Structure formats: C-alpha cells, structure tokens
Image (cartoon, helix red, strand yellow):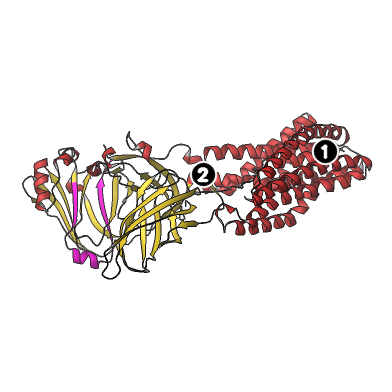
Amino acid sequence: MKWAALAVVLFLISSVTADGGAYVRYTYDTDRLSRISEDIQYGYIEHERGVEELRIAVACDLDGEEAFWILPLPAQASEVEVDILEGFPKFRGYDVESRTGSIVSKWPYLTLTQGYPLFGSPLLLWHLGVFNMGGGGRSSSAGGTDAGINIETRLEKKGLTVEVLEAESWQALDGYLKGKGVSLPDSDRPAVQEYIGQRYSFVVSWISNVGVYKRSGSDTLSLKARFPVEKPYYPLKLTSVYGEETVPIRLYLKGFMTPRLYDGISGSSKSKYYVNEDGMRYTKVTVNAKANSFKEDLWFSKGAPLKMYPAYLLSSNQYLTLLILYLFCSVTAALFAGLVVDRMRNPLTYVKIGMFNLLSIVGVVYATNKHLDDSKEKRDRLLGAMLAVVPVISVPALLGTLYLVDRVSYLLRIQSYYGNNFFGIIFTAVKAYMVWNLANVLIVVASILFYRKVRRKAALIPAAFFGGVMLIMLSSSTLYTLSRLTGSNLLRNMSQFVNILYIIPITVLPFMFLGGIAKLLARWRPATYATVFSVTFIITLAATSLTIMEVYPPVKTTAWGSYATGFVKIKPQLAATEMTSDGEFYGIFTNGAGATINVKRVLIETDSGMLCDGVLEGGSFSAGENFLVKGYGCTDGEQGDRYEAHITIDYEYQIGANEPTQQSDEGSIRGVIY
C-alpha cells in the first residue's frame, strides 16, 4: 500500500501545475528595425564622455517636392558638426526583461531529473549596427551673418542642404526662415523663442535639389549632428507645433539609458532594454502621444532601473545561472529532508547527497543508499530503487510519443480560427486528457506490480482507487468533447456534474500520502529521505521560478493562425500582414475590383477599442496591383497577444466612360502581435 500511495501522491503533486485546457508557451520580446516609415520620427543617440552623436531620420515621400527640418541643439553653433547619411542604423535584439522570464520559465524542465513529473505535467512539454555612410559632400564653414543670424556651417550633399546657425531673436529667425520659403505661424513662436538666448543653436535642413535627391536612390534622410552636452538629449518641444496630431517617435540609445518622462507623455511612453547578437546593449523609447503634449525636450540619465541589472546578468549567463540555481535548490532540498527525516544529524552528508542530484533522482537514490541505509531488508531496497529508477528509464520513449501527438494537434488546430474544427477538438482532448493521464497510469501500474510482491490483495486497493479516478476523467473529457462537437448544452452540463466527483479523490489522496509516509518512516529511511528531497526540490524550484517570472514576466504565446473574413474585391495577403507590439500595422492588399481604383480612406479598428487611419503609399492602383496599408497606434497589446483588426477601405473606380462609382470594402484580419 505504501508504494502505491507514494506513487499516487507524486502523480498528484506533478499534476496540479496543469492548466485547465489551454497550453501557454513562454517566449521573449524581440526588437527589429529594418525599415523606416515616413510617418514616424526615428532617432539614434550615442553619448560618451560628454559628447553626443545624434542621428535623426525622417523618410520622405518622393511624390512631394518640399521638405524642411529644424533641429534645436543645446550647444553653440561653433561646437556642432553635421553630416548627411544614407539610410539609418538597423537594430535587432532581444528584450532583457522578457528574455529573463522566458529563460526562467524553462527551469521547470529541471524537474524531469526527478522522473515522475514528466507523467503529470503537460507544462513541461510546452515548454545593431549596419550603417551606410554614403559618399562625400561639400561642406564649409560659412561664418555668414544675415540680420541677426550667424550661419556657422553649411553642408550640401545628395540634394540636401544643412545649415548650423544661431539666432539673436525670434524676428531674426523668422526672417531667415521666410527667406527659405518657410513661414511659421505666430502660435509656434513660444516653442521656438524659448531656445533663443539660451546657448542653443539650430540645425536647419531642406531638400534643395529634388532631382539629385531622388536620383540618390534613398527615401530616407539621416541627419547626423555631433555636439558637446552633459547628458543625452533629444529635441521634442518643437514637435508640439503639430497640435492634436499624434506623432509616433522611436528613439534608440546605445547602452542602457533612462528617459526623464514628464506629465503628458509618461502615460503614452515606454522604455525597453535590449541586447543585440553582438552583445551591444541599447535602449528603445517609444512615444505615441499627441504633439501638443510635448512641453519639454527629452533628457536621459545613464543607466537602467535597478531591476534590469540582475535580468541582464541572468539572460547573458543563463547556463551558469542555471547551474547555480540547480545546486541551490538541490542543497536546500537535501538539508530540509535531513531535518525532517534524520533531525539534521550530519549536514555535510546531506550537502553531498544534494550534489548527487546532478545525476538526477537516480544519483540521489544511490547516495541515500550509501550514506543513510540501515535496512537489512533487500526487498525494501529493491522496491525503493525500482520506484525511483523506472520513471527515469521511461522518459525518452514517452516524451517522444507526447511530442508527436502535440505536433500533430498543433498542425491541425492552426489551420482554423480558434482551433474549433473537428480534428482540433479531438486531438486537444486526446492530448489534454487521455495521453496525459495514460502516462500516470503507467507509473501507478508499475508501482502496483512491485507492491504485489509484498501483499497481493492489498494491491487491489490503489488499483481500484486509481481506476475510479481514471473513469471520472474519461467520462468528463468524453462528455465535454461530444458537447463541443455537437454544441449540446446538456452534454456540457453533464460534464460539469461529473467534474464534481473529483472532490472525492482529491480529499482521499492526502490521507493516502500521509499513511504511506508513516509506514515508510518505519520501514525504510532512505526511501522517505529521497521522497522528501524530491518533493522539496520541485517546490523550491517552482517557487523560485514563479517569483522571478513575476518580476520579469515573459511573453505568452499561443497557437493562433492568421485568418481573414469579408473583403469582397480588395483582398489582403495574410503572409504579408503583421501587427507589432509598438501598435504598428502593415498589410499588403490586392486590387481585385477589375479596374483601376482610387482609395479615398482606410480605417483600422482593433479589438482593443483603438481606432487609427491607414496610411497609403499613393492612392491610385490598377487592376491586380498590390498596395501597402500602414497604421500607427492601432493596438496596445504585447508581443504574442492575439489581435483582430476590422478594416474599412473606401474607394472609387470607373469603367469606361461611366461615372466613377463609390464603393466600400471591409473585413477582419486576425493574427498574433509580433
């Protein structure tokens, strides 16, 4: 009885971690910047030894003929160096915080060293810099003055002109800009005037030769400015001239930096810390606020919040951290088991036994037999060793079987929305109920066979008990599966009623466990020690993992295939549709109207209640032509979350000499945020 009781309680301990039917896989957030959008401000900052190198990129629509930028910098014009570059730095890295949580989420796999958790926990099975510097340009130290304007530097390159200047007054700057064909309204005067007389200079840039600019082959202006400043700085205040318009801003900073956010943008801004494949640390700051909330420029202090540094050490040294944690949990479990079973007679001996856990539970059984065995009963030693070793031997074959069933289930379920097709329902039920619990039957039957060598009739008690548990499980799962296939509420209610019967085994199992432990204490001390050690090790490991995951939450992902409904004539290409964790939507659509269309408006509404206008590159598209739709601030979801976007496309088309026809096409796209 004691061995069956022990096996059943180990099954119970490993089963309580299971989710009710939805399996979540933990991963981590990644960052990728490989393309520039003309609707987003991009900035890159390097700050070392009191000198900042600031790069600002704005992608220009080549259909336009004019572009003009004004950049205030906290330095004198004579201290500013400027250049014009093609493209913008490319970034790709992992988020330190969520990667830490993702690494820790895999620590429960270490419980497989104890053998039996495999049979009861499906959780264990689910479980920068590219720069194009461009060619040379013509630069000069202008040293000119124009009615209160001191132009320190002038640079002409790739159809662009850049001037670094200082202004004595608002009137002087206004006159200078009007000479360039730019007129600032009086409402913008306060934002600009605050810089004048405060040791600030202005970097002014514009497209001076449209033909040369277009022939350069780059849609992106990347302006580099190098200047002395005590702390990292990004000019934000002048963007307030856009009023109620939302101006998305993406800032990348080399190293870990903390932005000094103020009221108005703190609620719509977030900072994340990344490491790229070369080990370079960088910070990404995302701002999605209305322009009129930009009351101050953005300053940064070096360093990240304190909790980032343990995460960085763990994520960059995961194997060393894993070894240290494993040894810590093993020694802790060994000392606790020694206190419970042996009253801590020899702590050093227990530490040695804990070290043997590096060889799995088999090593612990060996060490306890060697150091603690005082039994002369060869039969007891054989039973204890077999109960510990059999699960470990069974792991490879059973792991392969469960993995195969899981993959087949996933491939079938991902083909349909929510996985609610016939094969998805059947395989989900098989995996979640039948296969999982069948594995537990194997280990319990094995323990019963060993027990029969002691008392043949008594072995029927755990067999009958566990048979009843399995009958309840199979009945409940069968009724629930049939209710999903048929849509019958009666079958669903019957399944819920059968579930109530679980109260009986859940109530009885603890008493069986306590009874088995009491008999083991009197019969064979090493078996009791190994049991207490194993359970304590799992609890310690799980508690440590969950605590760290609470501090550094990983990204949760679920099986979810892309899916679209609606869209009669304007068809989305799902393979080229994506939603990012920054709230950016990209979708390729095909004109299937059979004639040239002129898209008037695209409206994107997501299931998170956010509404955004789609942005097009061009407006007229011929029959069969593809066109890109982009949206910003479309969702506040995180990577791995599901999303649904309802898209309305208003357009007109004309066939022959007929009058243009106004049409509207709409539909929904579902997918996963990346």
Rendered residue at 34%/60% (across/down): 131
Q: Amino acid at mark 1?
A: Ala
Q: Which residue is mark 1?
A: 5
Q: Is residue 627 visible?
A: yes
Magenta highlight on residue 417: no
Which circle marks residue 313 in the picture?
2
Magenta highlight on residue 203: yes
Bounds of the magenta span?
202-231
* Image height of 467 relative to 91, above or below: above
Rendered residue at 47%/46% (across/down): 638
Q: Is residue 344 visible?
A: no
Q: Is residue 632 left or right of residue 405?
A: left
Q: What is the tally of numbered marks visible in this picture?
A: 2
Q: Amino acid at mark 2?
A: Leu
User: Residue lying farthest left?
Assistant: 147
Nearest the viewer among 674 and 387 is 674
Q: Position of residue 258 (x, y in %)?
A: 38, 40
Pointer 2 with pointer 1, Cβ within 8 A: no
